[in-house]
Amino acid sequence: MLQICARKFKSAYANLDSLELSSLAGPYEGPIWAVVLGLLGLAGAFANGAVLLVFARTAALRNRSNRLVMNLLSINLLSCFLLPTLGALDLLRPSAISGAVGESSAAGILASSAIGVLCVAADQYRAVLRPLTYHGFRPMHAALASWFAGVVAASGALPGLSEETSLWKLEGFSLPPRLFRHYFAIAFVSLFFIIPVLTLMFLYGCIYAEAHRNSKRARRHVDPSTPISPPLLPQSTSKPRLVSSLKHRISNASLFRYREEARAARISFLVVFTCVVCWAPYCALLLLRTQLGLSIPPPALAASLALLSCTSLVSPALFAFRSRRLQREVARMLLCRGPQSYGGWRREITASLAPSCKAADVESPPDTSRSSFSSGTSTQGTSELE
């Protein structure tokens, strides 16, 4: 049955190929896709390089979980240099060597990215559901595993790309290239696409379930008839940053009961959706080439490489830029501002709220004005005994 479906699909594809649809795009399709890949590479290199530079400058941000994020950003940075360069070279000056090296690099980048994202998700899972055993997780081992998977996938994609030669020769035994490509494609798609996506769905499903239970527990302990009061607004202010900050606080106060659950659902959906959209086209074209023997047109290959390069743009937003502190550090580095420029508007908020806080203060008698924990001295009154 599968052979009949494959034969029908192959004949339909041959009919479409006979129309020579690629000639309709003109001679500029190669340079256009090369420019698109170059722009994606530059944007991804800027985003990942800026975050890595902030991590290198700020030691407080290099905690256990952020080390795995740094590893994923390093993989993205490497892909920003390799994929656009090799893809543009194969589009502008196609050759067997450039095609083989580009295929090997794309397979290695996808495998490393898949294992890197999986390690970040596993780290978040252990932090939320297994906090007692969280410190037993070694980020260095996970980072090495992601790079090792990329090297294995790249070295496996390089042999057998040409029908004339094969690099797998052990004691006179040479595996046929077509047979090797057939089994390699199945193993590659299974190990680095299907299993990671299913594992991500399971991990983020468990994280969302835990957030849902915490949200229900929090709502159970809060009276639903009691509204959450927003923070007090100052009477007179003319600062746009102050107004936007207070509006943001009011909206967060109104959504406090469902914030954790909604955030977990949003992040879970975005991570899984990004992985499927960015990785599925490349894996589908790999199966079409190896299992059915179809010749894929260069624009389709370039589109799959472009989607694969989009992973380096989306990953920093999903795993790094969610931190407010990291956002401030990146903005401070890019705008060349000091710490005082970002603390000024916070001091303005404190100064505007100071009169209302002073009006709410209750004066205590002088004998009991000192705290029992003040400076380790006695807690007696300050009046002298005659």
Image (tube, grey):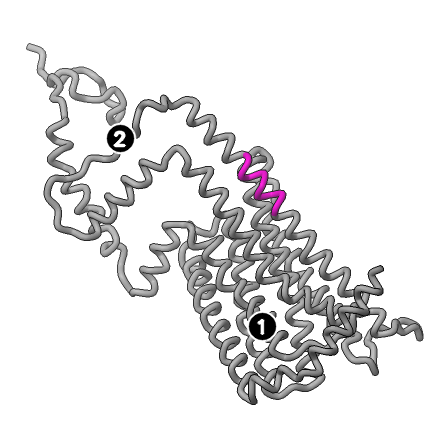
Secondary structure category for the residue under label 2: loop
Type of the residue with mark 2: Ser
Task: Determine which of the numbered discs, if any, sits on residue 303 in the image.
Answer: 1
Q: Nearer the viewer, residue 357 or 222?
A: 222
Amino acid type at circle 1 is Ala
Residue 68's place in the image compared with 354, above or below, is below
Q: Is residue 189 visible?
A: yes
Q: Which mark is residue 44?
A: none
Q: Residues within 10 Å of mark 1 (few under 14, many from 20)?
A: some
Marked residue nearer the N-terminal end (1 or 2): 2
User: What is the quadrant of residue 30 in the picture?
Assistant: bottom right
Return the x and y of residue 61 as percentages of the image width and height: 43, 51
Tell me the magenta residue range. Answer: 201-209
* Up/down of 106 relative to 130, above or below: below
- Taking the spot 65% from the left edge, 67% from the top edge, the residue there is 282
Residue 124 x/y as whole percent: 54, 44
Q: Nearer the viewer, residue 253 or 66?
A: 253
Q: Is residue 111 left or right of residue 309?
A: right
Q: According to the image, label 2 marks what residue?
A: 229
**Is 58 or 367 nearer to us in this picture?**
58
